[in-house]
Amino acid sequence: MYIQNRYSVEDQADIIAFLHAHPFGTVVTHDGDKPIATHVPLRFDEANGQLTTHVSKANPQWRTIEEQDVLIIFQGPDAYVSASWYGHEDVSTWNYQAVHVYGRATILNETELIEELAGLLHEHEGEREHAVRWDDLSEPVKRQMHGVVGFRIDITDIQATFKLSQNRNDVDHERIVSELEKQDEPIADVMRRHRKS
C-alpha cells in the first residue's frame, strides 16, 4: 500500500486498537487468472500475531488460500473533505483509515474451527441478554459448520495509514471536523481524538 509519510501509522497500540474496533475485512488472494476477494469477520490475536476467519465451503477462494501470501484489508470511517472548508485555496480530498495485513494462511481442522466459531460468538455476543453461545446451540445448528472452511493467517507484515487532515493548521482542522460533524460523519470524532494524541 502506498502511504505518505505524514499519514503513516507506526504506533502498534493504535494499529491493534483499530483491528479490534474494525473486525470486518476483505481477504484478497489470486486464483491464477485474477484477484479474488471475500468480505468476512476476522478475529485478531495480537499475542500470537494471527487472524482467524471462515468462508463458505461453496466459495472457491478457500482452495487458493494456502498456496500464496494473503492480503487482508481493513477500513475505518471515511469522508469527503471539501476545499471550501479551508482558509485558503487548495484541493478537496478524502480522509480515511486503512490497514493492510499480509500473511500466510493455514486451513483450520475441525477442533480449531469450532474454537474459531465459538470465539467469534463470544466476542460479538458479549454479555448481552440471551447471548448466543456455541455450547448452547443444538446439534443441527452446530452441523452447519460443515458448510464453512476456517483458516488462520500468520501475520508477516502490517501497513497502516490514517489520513486525518494532519497537514492542516489548527484552524482549518477544526473547521473540517466541525463540517464533518454537521454531516454526522464518524471520522470527525476520530480526527478530534487523533489531533489531541
Image: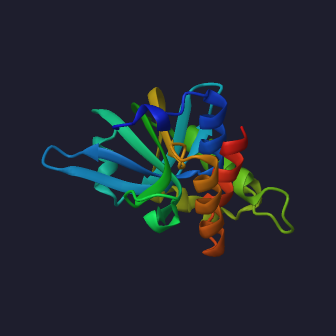
Q: Position of residue 160 (x, y in %)?
A: 48, 37
Can the viewer see residue 46? yes
191 or 102, nearer to the observer = 191
The image's colouring method is rainbow
Residue at 80%, 64% in the rendered image:
131
Which quarter of the rendering shows the N terminus? top left
Camera sees residue 152: no
Q: Residue furthest left?
A: 33
Give residue 29's position: percent from left, percent from top.
Answer: 29, 44
Quadrant location, the C terminus: top right
Question: Which image quarter: residue 13?
Answer: top right
Observer-nearest of 1 and 89: 89
Give the farthest residue toward the front: 88
Q: Residue at x 51, y 60 (%)?
A: 86
Please give left or right for residue 176 compared with residue 60 in the image: right
| Residue 118 left/right relative to 28 | right
Residue 82 location (% of width, % of height): 46, 66
In the displayed structure, would residue 78 be above or below residue 70? below
The image shows a total of numbered marks equal to 0
139 vs 33: above or below = below
Q: Residue at x 67, y 49 (%)?
A: 118
The foreground one among 22 and 108 is 22
Residue 121 percent coordinates (x, y): 69, 55
Q: Is residue 7 left or right of residue 46?
A: left
- Residue at the image point whose x is 84% and y is 64% from the top: 128
163 shown above or below 141: above
